[in-house]
Image: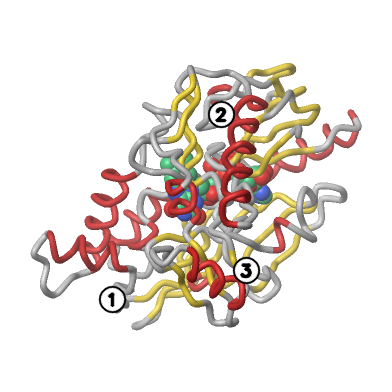
Amino acid sequence: MSITEFASLQHYNTLALEARARALAQVCQSADLAAACAWARREGLPLVPLGQGSNIVLAQDLDALVVLMATRGVDILSDGSDEVLLRVAAGENWHELVQWALVKGLYGLENLALIPGTVGAAPVQNIGAYGVELASMIEAVHAHVIDDDTRLVLSRDDCAFGYRDSVFKHGLRDRVVITAVDLRLSRRPRLQLDYPALAQGLRSARVVSPTPIDVFNAVIRLRRSRLPDPAVQPNAGSFFLNPLVSMEQAEALAARFPALPMYAQTDGGIKLAAGWLIDFCGWKGYRNNNLGIHPQHALVLVNYGNDSGRQLLQLAETVAQSVADTFGVQLVIEPRVYGE
Ligand SMILES: Cc1cc2nc3c(=O)[nH]c(=O)nc-3n(C[C@H](O)[C@H](O)[C@H](O)COP(=O)(O)OP(=O)(O)OC[C@H]3O[C@@H](n4cnc5c(N)ncnc54)[C@H](O)[C@@H]3O)c2cc1C
């Protein structure tokens, strides 16, 4: 494993923000990870694991050893007539895994097609899309403790998954590197078609009895039509979480804004669509020099050529403030911000 000091991270975050890491290393096998942890301890530096940098905002240089997780491999742990248990290395590309599973006739991941990033980062925010969350397929998460090189195996319950949330954003934040994820997939299609845009997408494609491959293709069409490709227009996907409000707050908002979409949650709360709130405030398509809000997707902040994470965060703050002023709802940034 080689370590590069004072390395640019501009090519390692999908917002293409310029920031330098005090040191950068690529981890291709578990021995590299132990060596990287030892190096960081010797230098007195924190260690920051990165996948593809599709859910981070770099607001300043990182005085840390940044470790790019590039371990590969998919092992079949058990192969039953109904279900298959896989162990997938952290550095595997998420979308390639979804494709691989479909080709093997292993189902459950179709709705999560084309989400950028690595398998190791996926449990951190319990990736979700089109009515499915990763948590429903996770059997266990394997992690390496940065401070003492011990190994943890966390069950699904241990991971405390929630909406874009997990223990890796709380108790285990900055303490572990996820090394592998065990996923239980089905040999029988178990389609999840409740999400209205997905059902509509299948109808538009005149698919009457969808297969998992139809769902996979419909999700890809939808995502390509709505979300900018970070390689062309640097972005981090949805920049804000959908806010959760109480029933009382939702009723008060519904009286003032009858068209405001609301989604009832199992805990009695109500989820609002952050994109709708931002769009209502007139931000969709906003552009100021090298920063803007995507013209088709009000939740996506686009970097048209700006280097500075701080400027991007200033725009995010202005957007959030206008939503707070209009609706009394506080938006929370989804990507992890480094160097606020
Ligand atoms: C265009 C676009 C669309 C998106 N759509 C969706 C979507 O539909 N649904 C969704 O949920 N997300 C979406 N995202 C967000 C993003 O794709 C996911 O959060 C993804 O899981 C991030 O993977 P990554 O490898 O890029 O993580 P990174 O951005 O590299 O890291 C994100 C965080 O996880 C930590 N981390 C990374 N790897 C590890 C590891 N091995 N161990 C411990 N911590 C780790 C990092 O330290 C960092 O804090 C989208 C992003 C983009 C750019």
Question: Viewer-proximal residue, 22 or 106?
Answer: 22
Task: Give the percent coordinates (x, y) of residue 80.
Answer: 39, 80
Question: Viewer-proximal residue, 301 or 70?
Answer: 301
* Above or below for 170 versus 302: below
Marks 1 and 3 sit apart, C-alpha to C-alpha, by 24 Å
Residue 161's disc is 3
Q: Amino acid at mark 2?
A: Tyr
- The residue at 50%/54% (across/down) is 274
Check disc 1 and report its element: helix, strand or loop.
Answer: loop
Q: Horizontally, is 34 left or right of 161 in the view? A: right
- The residue at 62%/51% (across/down) is 324
* Display coloring: secondary structure
Task: Give the percent coordinates (x, y) of residue 302.
Answer: 46, 31
Task: Give the percent coordinates (x, y) of residue 202.
Answer: 18, 64
Check disc 2 and report its element: helix, strand or loop.
Answer: helix
Which numbered disc flags the more N-terminal residue, 1 or 2?
A: 2
Circle 1/circle 2 CB separation < 8 Å: no
Quadrant including the N terminus: top right
Residue 32 lies in what quarter of the image?
A: top right
Q: Amino acid at mark 3?
A: Phe
Circle 2/circle 3 CB separation < 8 Å: no
* Above or below for 293 versus 109: above
Q: Horizontally, is 98 left or right of 20 in the view? A: left
- The residue at 72%/25% (across/down) is 60
Check disc 3 and report its element: helix, strand or loop.
Answer: loop
Viewer-nearest of labels 1 and 3?
Answer: 3
Pointer 1 residue Cβ closer than 8 Å to ligand 1: no
Q: Amino acid at mark 1?
A: Pro
- Provide the residue designation for mark 1: 189
* Above or below for 301 versus 281: above
- Provide the residue designation for mark 2: 12
Which numbered disc flags the more N-terminal residue, 1 or 3?
A: 3
